Image: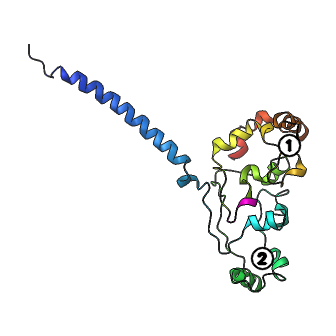
Amino acid sequence: MNFIFHPSMNTIARASIIGAVLFVAGLSGALIYFVRSPIMTNVGVAVQQPVPFSHLHHVRQVGLDCQYCHTSVEDSSFANVPPTETCMTCHSQIWTEAPMLEPVRQSFQNETPIEWNRVHNLSDFVFFNHSAHINNGVGCETCHGQVDNMPLTWKANTLQMEWCLACHRNPAQYVRPRDQITTMGYQLPDGQDQLTVGTQLVAEYGIEVGRLDDCSICHR
């Protein structure tokens, strides 16, 4: 009896199936890696600005607090970019002729805002409230990283949903005393651990842990 297919085709079929499975698995892994890579997330990529503003200089070296410039974070859903008048509080007295600050001087004289390039830009379908996080003990560096080490600002975390959910599902690992919100490089005193202190703060702040991973919290 003649066979339509040679017996060797069984081996070829098995190899094809295994190869297809491995190909799909490899492609899926590559896509997952790509979505999480700096190419897509821009994590660690410094964003060029019309004026090379350095958080390293202003925060670490000069000692400015986050809220000196970002005044609305306790009361508003967004962290405001400071008006040029805030910059000129100092720069009308120091570095008054610095070429790099010419756009700042022009902005002040012409009463036109500087068009800064966004570093953190959430999708339109995501609702984020800065004041809710600040008032519940989430420090600036938890999301933005240690900006006092950044000569130009870059995104320190992906801000993807899985990253947000890690905190929402276990806020005790992240919250800190409210008077330490803007502290860069925050560390607990010796003998204290984050989970114990965080659990106490979650209760003190009235954070409803069971509701924080509800879809409607961020998608409204």
Q: What element carries label 2?
A: helix
Residue in view at x 73 percent, y 40 percent: 167
The color scheme shown is rainbow
Q: Is residue 178 above or below residue 14?
A: below
Q: Is mark 1 on a helix, strand or loop?
A: loop
Residue in view at x 82 percent, y 74 percent: 86
Pair 1/2: label in front: 1
Q: Position of residue 153 (x, y in %)?
A: 68, 63
Residue in view at x 81 percent, y 77 percent: 85
The answer to whether residue 149 is magenta is: yes
Q: In this view, does 57 lie above or below 26?
A: below
Q: Give the mark, 1 or 2, whose residue is nearer the N terminus.
A: 2
Which SS does the magenta portion mostly show?
A: loop
Q: Which mark, residue 54?
A: none
Spatial CA span between label 1 and label 2? 36 Å
Amino acid at the residue labelled 2: Thr
Q: Where is residue 11 in the image (x, y as percent from the top left)?
A: 24, 23
> In this figure, which residue is indicated by the disc labeled 2?
84
Task: Write down the quadrant of residue 154 in the picture.
Answer: bottom right
Amino acid at the residue labelled 1: Leu
Residue in view at x 82 percent, y 34 percent: 195
The answer to whether residue 150 is magenta is: yes
> In this figure, which residue is indicated by the disc labeled 1?
188
Q: Where is residue 23 in the image (x, y as percent from the top left)?
A: 38, 36
Q: Is residue 193 above or below residue 184?
A: above
Q: Give the range drawn in magenta.
A: 148-152
Q: Do the residues labelled 1 and 2 touch (CB within 8 Å)?
A: no
